[in-house]
């Protein structure tokens, strides 16, 4: 089974590219950190941060384009893919990527609303079926 679950912070704005009939692919880096600790003998073990290359396709890529920003906290679920390519100098390079099947935004809604104005939220969002006038702008986000 090839399954990965990560919780981390977005390291850069997603790079979104479109291909074949409005299909999208988004890529960005995600930092996960294991907190440091102190051993019983007093030795300090520092924080350890790992960087992951995340790839999202189709609908997830379009959501990332609108709502994901540098510094946001995300939960990513997917699989690991290793690939290689030859760079411009002919040197073989290896890349490990996380191909996301699921993404959940963990940043507080208030931070998301400040970064993505409500005017960018899709019309008819499924986040709330209630159309009361007292409904807040936060309820229009699709997550």
Image (spheres, rainbow, N blue to C red):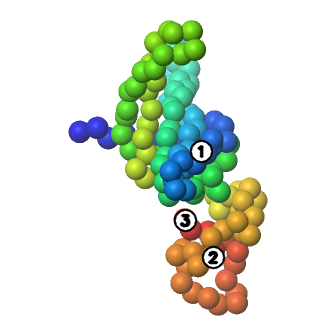
Residue placed at 36% from the left, 39% from the top? 79
143 displayed left or right of 70: left
- Residue 121 drawn at (x, y percent): 66, 68
Q: CA distance from mark 3 to mark 2?
A: 13 Å
Mark 1 lies on a secondary structure that is strand
Residue placed at 63% from the left, 36% from the top? 11
Mark 3 lies on a secondary structure that is loop
In terms of depth relative to the viewer, which is nearer, 27 or 115?
Answer: 27
* Residue marked by disc 3: 143
* Residue marked by disc 1: 17
Instruction: Specify the label residue 93 is tagged with.
Output: none
Q: Quadrant of the C terminus?
A: bottom right
Residue 46: which quarter of the image?
top right
In terms of depth relative to the viewer, which is nearer, 56 or 6?
Answer: 56
Q: CA distance from mark 3 to mark 1?
A: 23 Å
- Residue 7 drawn at (x, y percent): 49, 43
* Marks 3 and 2, the one that precedes in the sequence: 2
């Amino acid at each position: 089974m090839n399954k990965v679950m990560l919780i981390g912070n977005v390291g850069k704005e997603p790079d979104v590219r479109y291909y074949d009939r409005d299909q999208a692919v988004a890529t960005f880096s995600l930092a996960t950190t294991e907190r440091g600790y102190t051993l019983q003998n007093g030795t300090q073990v520092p924080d350890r941060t790992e960087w992951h290359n995340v790839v999202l396709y189709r609908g997830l890529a379009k959501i990332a384009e609108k709502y994901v920003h540098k510094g946001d906290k995300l939960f990513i679920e997917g699989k690991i893919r290793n690939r290689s390519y030859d760079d411009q100098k002919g040197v073989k390079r290896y890349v490990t990527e996380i191909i996301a099947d699921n993404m959940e935004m963990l940043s507080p809604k208030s931070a998301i609303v400040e970064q993505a104005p409500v005017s960018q939220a899709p019309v008819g969002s499924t986040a709330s079926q209630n159309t009361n006038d007292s409904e807040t702008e936060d309820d229009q986000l699709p997550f």
